Amino acid sequence: MLRQTLTHFGHTVTEARNGKEGLELFALAEFDLVITDIVMPEKEGLEVLMELRKRQPPMKIIAISGGGRQNAMGYLQTARFLGATKVMAKPFSNESLIAAVDELMLGETPAQPPTHA
């Protein structure tokens, strides 16, 4: 869903199946923004967040969570403490996702979807 929404609004997306793969991909290319879930296999989002902060401190990071062993807000408060630029509790709307990305990337109000002729 995230990939489809972001590409619909003109963003290029690199997708990872888990935190470990995400960090491996991060090492291979330059990215403007990272969106990480908190509860993931292999390497959880809080570990990913800490590693990204070590590798590239100014990276813009959106941490998302629907909860897990604790409620989403507990995870998201921890993510904010560890340096997430923005946090979002699931479920969230496509509009709020695009607004968060646009705010971080462009310092603007949300983009409009591309029109097709």
Image: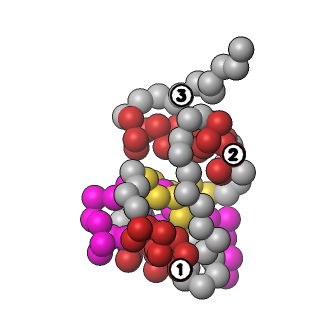
Asked if labels 3 and 2 touch by Cβ distance under 8 angstroms, the answer is no
Asked if labels 3 and 1 touch by Cβ distance under 8 angstroms, the answer is no
Indicate the secondary structure of the residue bearing disc 3. loop
Residue 75 picture location, percent across and down = 54, 72
Residue 56 picture location, percent across and down = 29, 66
Front position among marks 1 and 3: 1
Q: Which comes before the other along the chain, label 1 or label 3?
A: 1
In which quadrant of the rendered view does residue 104 lie? top left
Residue at numbered disc 3? 111
Residue at numbered disc 1? 20
Find the residue positioned furthest to the front: 28
Q: Which comes before the other along the chain, label 2 or label 3?
A: 2
Figure coloring: secondary structure
| Viewer can see residue 74 | no
Q: Is residue 1 left or right of residue 20?
A: right
Residue drawn at (64%, 81%) of the image: 41
Residue drawn at (62%, 41%) of the image: 7
Front residue (pair 64, 76): 64
Residue 17 picture location, percent across and down = 64, 71
Is 66 in the magenta?
yes
